[in-house]
Amino acid sequence: MKDRLRNIPPKQWVKAAVWGTLYVLFLVWHGNWWWVLLLPVIADAFTTRFINWTWWRRFRPAAEGEAPNPKANKTLYTICSWIDAIVFALVAVYFINLYLFQNYQIPSSSLEKSLRVGDFLFVSKASYGPRVPNTPLSFPLVQHTFPAWLGGRKSYIEQPQWDYRRLRGWDHPKKDDIVVFNFPTGDTVCLKQQNPDYYTLCHYYGRDVVRQRKDIFGDIVWRPVDRRENYVKRCVGEPGDTLQIIDNQIYINGRPLPDHEGVQYNYYVQTTGGLLSAKTLEQLGISKDDRHLIPQTQAGLQEIAAVGLDPARPVYHFPLTRAMKASLEGNAAVDTVVTEPEWRGGDVYPLGATTWTRDNYGPIYIPRKGETLRLTEENMPVYQRLIETYEHRHASVGEDYTFGMDYYWMMGDNRHNSADSRYWGFVPEDHIVGRPVFIWLSIEKDKPWLKGHIRWNRLFRNAAQ
């Protein structure tokens, strides 16, 4: 033992000290001191090497000029080299993805024009403090299901499951922050119809129908918090706020919350008689997917008449920002621009228990951890899911209930095309994933590779605005 210690090069002691210090600092941050038992293993890897982690290197074929290696086995050496590299990469990616950052792609237009479909984001998990995983045994870079070509099975093992715990960050979600979070009502999922969510499907079709008609809705699965779909929205309400929406204007604690410049709403646009050119729509920034010309069918004519426009002239249905709306209103080819009526928004949270609408909503109190609220017949439908599903407790009408977590209200900037808190309610703190930091790639699917397919002007832009 003394000879082995004596023969260790000084640089190996330095490496052991550096990595040991980093590991101890990680334990201080993490707070789980059982992991200190691995410290001797880290020291051994750099110094004494009682555990021979690189046993397979003895089979390395001799290089040119070296003496022949009698144990050489090129095939075994190559296979083990690849396994070693892959295992190291997977472990590194797992911990980086878990505690520091992850990649996220914008899948829908709910945050247009702030974050656009095809944007790839660098999401910081350390900003709000990373969560200790609920399901620690999972495959990195896969949220919940392997691709079909890999079998389409779950990418995680359900047991063990750890309780919610968040490491210390340097901030918390605030109003106007763009936040990535796990979809709160994504705990139960119909595999063949995942949008709208399971609870909305049950509201419209009935729970028995949804569970029995597997040919339409597919199998129903349950997912733990950290394996639910990742959503990205803008925080418009913090714990302790009271939120209300009046004619599409958000009010927080009785004061109007200024709209971000990227906020847009749906409008019906009637022309003076002709069609709008593709160039005009492209210059406005309206994507091909959003260019809806109401068809001259019976249903289309009824829709046009329902919003008070002339069925004899072309009518478009667009999402527009204030600037885009003003530009269209100043276009000689446009006669009328009408805001989409609120009845098109459908039922809102809590489903079937309120007369609120997408455009006129609330007032609703956003719970803060440690605050107590008297439960009544009126507010019980609003808070029942929080109490029973998110906090796993029970309370009845007439009781005073003290909330165990902070909650947030998230909405998309594309207000009439966003499935957000108005439809599925609050986002609990244990669902918060992280903050987008910057856009590292942006793809415009409507354009070819050499004509704007990559949005170069969006690369490395601040994604949190």
Image (cartoon, helix red, strand yellow):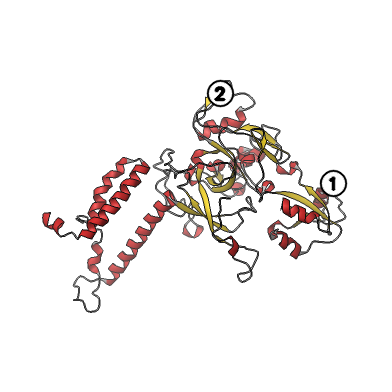
Kind of residue at badge 1: Gly
Please name the residue that numbered disc 1 is placed on: 308
- Residue at the spot 42% in from the left edge and 44% down from the top edge: 133
State how far apart marks 2 and 1 are (Cα). Answer: 46 Å
Question: Mark 2 Cα within 10 Å, few/some/many (few <14, many 20+)?
Answer: few
- Residue at the spot 61% in from the left edge and 57% down from the top edge: 117
Question: In front here: 78 or 338?
Answer: 338
Question: Mark 1 Cα within 10 Å, few/some/many (few <14, many 20+)?
Answer: few
- Return the x and y of residue 111 as percentages of the image width and height: 62, 50
- Return the x and y of residue 413 as percentages of the image width and height: 64, 48
Give the numbered dot on residue 151: none
| Picture layout, residue 362 above or below residue 97 | above
Q: Nearer the viewer, mark 2 or mark 1?
A: 1
- Return the x and y of residue 325 as percentages of the image width and height: 75, 52
Does residue 358 appear in the picture of this structure?
Answer: no
- Residue at the spot 87% in from the left edge and 51% down from the top edge: 310
- Return the x and y of residue 440 as percentages of the image width and height: 53, 60
Kind of residue at badge 2: Ser
- Which quarter of the rendering shows the N terminus? bottom left
Q: Secondary structure at mark 2?
A: loop
Asked if marks 2 and 1 touch (Cβ < 8 Å), the reply is no
Q: Earlier in the sequence, mark 2 or mark 1?
A: 1
> Does residue 435 appear to the left or right of 35 in the view shown?
right
Q: Residue furthest bottom?
A: 65
Question: In front here: 59 or 107?
Answer: 107
| Picture layout, residue 321 above or below residue 78 | above
Q: Secondary structure at mark 1?
A: loop
Instruction: Specify the quadrant of the image occupied by residue 239.
Output: top right
> Does residue 455 appear to the left or right of 275 in the view shown?
left
Give the numbered dot on residue 396: 2
Question: In front here: 113 or 374?
Answer: 113
Q: Residue furthest top?
A: 398
